[in-house]
Every structure is written in structure tokens, then in C-alpha cells.
Image (spheres, helix red, strand yellow):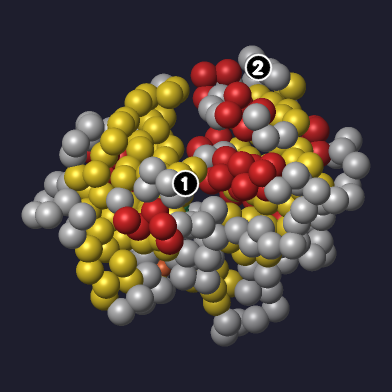
Amino acid sequence: MNPTCKKRLGAIRLETMKVVAQEEIAPKIFELVLEGEMVEAMRAGQFLHLRVPDDAHLLRRPISISSIDKVKKQCHLIYRIEGAGTAIFSTLSQGDILDVMGPQGNGFDLSDLDEQSQVLLVGGGIGVPPLLEVAKELHARGVKVVIVLGFANKDAVILEMELAQYGQVFVTTDDGSYGIKGNVSVVIKDLDNQFDAVYSCGAPGMMKYINQTFYDHPRAYLSLESRMACGMGACYACVLKVPESETVSQRVCEDGPVFRTGTVVL
Ligand SMILES: Cc1cc2nc3c(=O)[nH]c(=O)nc-3n(C[C@H](O)[C@H](O)[C@H](O)COP(=O)(O)OP(=O)(O)OC[C@H]3O[C@@H](n4cnc5c(N)ncnc54)[C@H](O)[C@@H]3O)c2cc1C
Ligand code: FES
């Protein structure tokens, strides 16, 4: 099959992207570089729905876009091996092709921020990667970026040096084996809370904390995960409830994965 073959099914874009490189950057955590025309359309905070290159696994796996290079038409994904699908992704190497649907989801709203603005980025574990593109783009506009990262332990720390190019980085670990002992709240509670925007992605406990802490903030965003099937808004496998409504729901794949704090039930 032509490796750049792509087709549109309604608004859905499918493309076979080429694997440019793959590297294990921490135990069981891989950075995959893909190349293809789809990169043109990618925005920070969106995800790719990847077909597992194995006929036994019918459902695609959603992985966030970590960084985007539109000149090279390349994007980076960072994922952790959780089960069979991600284990198969980890065997891919340069020159392989991957069947990709995307870019999916709404992405982060980075509008109206400039050199007068100060933003807070909060990432936890394998939720850190989508914040890299956010930091890169905002730093390029002169925005002051403060980044608080939380990990289980020293071995799990990723992207600290990459993010340090774009802002002031604080690292916490649950066991104190690296950086500040504790979770991200230990740092955030002592920060000046005058941020123009807050962008976050991490485990459910961290997302609940950010949702509560910045509940009424007009521009605080959560990038959320949910088990997905279709990944394109059709099956309603990924819905979240909306506060004070029994009937309205939000699909993580189509209405998210980025939501404003206070707009979904966590
Ligand atoms: C919008 C979105 C963006 C994501 N971005 C990333 C990313 O950038 N990097 C990354 O490493 N992972 C990311 N994930 C999670 C990733 O999709 C799952 O880890 C992956 O699908 C697991 O597939 P598998 O076949 O390896 O494991 P499976 O065999 O399918 O599952 C293994 C274990 O992981 C759990 N699991 C699977 N999918 C999810 C999920 N979506 N949420 C919570 N638990 C899950 C299962 O319950 C099971 O316990 C994202 C998920 C979503 C919804
Ligand atoms: S996964 Fe089907 S609607 Fe979201």
C-alpha cells in the first residue's frame, strides 16, 4: 500500500504514517516519531487513534500528540506499555508504517496569550507528554510558563529537560526519590495563583485536585482519559456526566479530551 495513502470518511482522516524512530526513554516508556501529511492538521492536546498492527486487536488505541514539527511533517508520541496493544507498538522500528486516525479531539485552547501572560502547566506521569507542545508554543510567544510535574519515583521522570527549555520546572515524586517529595499540590499551594490559564493532564486523582482547585477559573483545562472504542464520537463508550444534569453527557473523544474545569463530573 502507498505509505502516504489517506482517505477521508466524512470528517475522519485516516492515514498510513511512517515510523521515523522509536526509543525507550524510561522503563516501559517509549517515544515514537511518526511522519505524514496528517501532521499539518495537528494541534496541541489532540490525540491519534492508532490501529494495532495485529489482526487480533480490533480496537484502536488513543495516544496523545506530544510534539509537532510541521516543517518536517513529524510528530512525537510518548506512551507507556500497559497491555498487548502498546506492547506491539513498542516493537515498531524505523520504516514501519502505522494506520492512524486523527488528529482527534479538540486540543488545548492556546488563544489570546502573549508576553504579558503567565500560565501554569501541571502534568502527572504519562500525562506529561501532551504538555510539551503547549509549553513550546506558548514559550515561542513570550508567555511566562511555570510547569509542575508529578511522578511516582525517579525512574518514571520524563521530559524534565525538554520542558525546562520553555519554563520554570518543579518536579515532585511520591516517594521523594527525585525532586520534591509529595504530589504536585505540595508545589501548587505555594505558587502565586494569578495564572491567566492552567493546562493539565494526569491521573484521575490529579485531575480531581486540579478541577477542585481551579473550579471557577475561566481558563483552567483538564485533558482527560477514558476507555475508548470508536474514538470518533459515534459509540458513546467514553462519556462523562455534566454537573447537575442527568441527561447531558460529554464524549471524551469528540467533545474532549480537553475540558474546562467545572464542566464535567470527575
Ligand atoms: C485521549 C487519550 C489519550 C491518551 N494518551 C496517552 C499517551 O499519550 N500515552 C500513553 O501511554 N497512554 C495514553 N492513553 C492511554 C492509552 O490509550 C492506553 O494505555 C492504551 O490504549 C492501552 O492499550 P493496551 O492494548 O496496551 O492495553 P489494554 O490491554 O487495552 O489495557 C491494559 C490496561 O490498561 C487499562 N487501560 C486501557 N486503556 C485505558 C485508558 N484509556 N484509560 C485508563 N486505563 C486504560 C486497561 O483497563 C487495562 O487495565 C491515552 C488515552 C486516551 C483516552
Ligand atoms: S469512543 Fe466512541 S464516542 Fe467516544
Q: At 28% from the left edge and 55% from the top edge, which residue is drawn? A: 100
Residue under pointer 1: 68
> Looking at the picture, does residue 46 appear above or below residue 136?
below
Q: Is residue 200 above or below residue 160?
A: below
Instruction: Name the spot of residue 38 as percent of width and height, x first.
Output: 35, 57
The total number of labels drawn is 2
**Quarter for ligand 2?**
bottom left
Task: Describe residue 211's horizontal placement relative to residue 124 as left or right.
Answer: right
The residue shown at (58%, 55%) is: 223
Residue 92 sits in quarter: top left
Q: Is residue 157 above or below residue 65?
A: above
- The x, y position of residue 32, in whole percent, is 35, 36
The residue type indicated by label 2 comes to Tyr
User: Residue 264, located in which quarter of the rendered image?
Assistant: bottom right
Residue occupied by mark 2: 178
The residue lying toward the viewer, choosing from 3 and 83, is: 3
- The crowd level at tag 1 (other Cα within 10 Å; few <14, some 14-19, many 20+) is many
Q: Residue at x 29, y 36 (%)?
A: 20
Residue 240 in percent (x, y) is at 54, 68
Q: Secondary structure at mark 1?
A: strand
Tell me the distance, in whole angstroms, between the alpha carbons under discs 1 and 2.
Answer: 29 Å
- Residue displayed at 54% across by 54% down: 45
Give the amino acid type for the residue marked by disc 1 in the picture. Answer: Ile
Q: Do residues under tags 1 and 2 come within 8 Å of each other at their CB atoms?
A: no
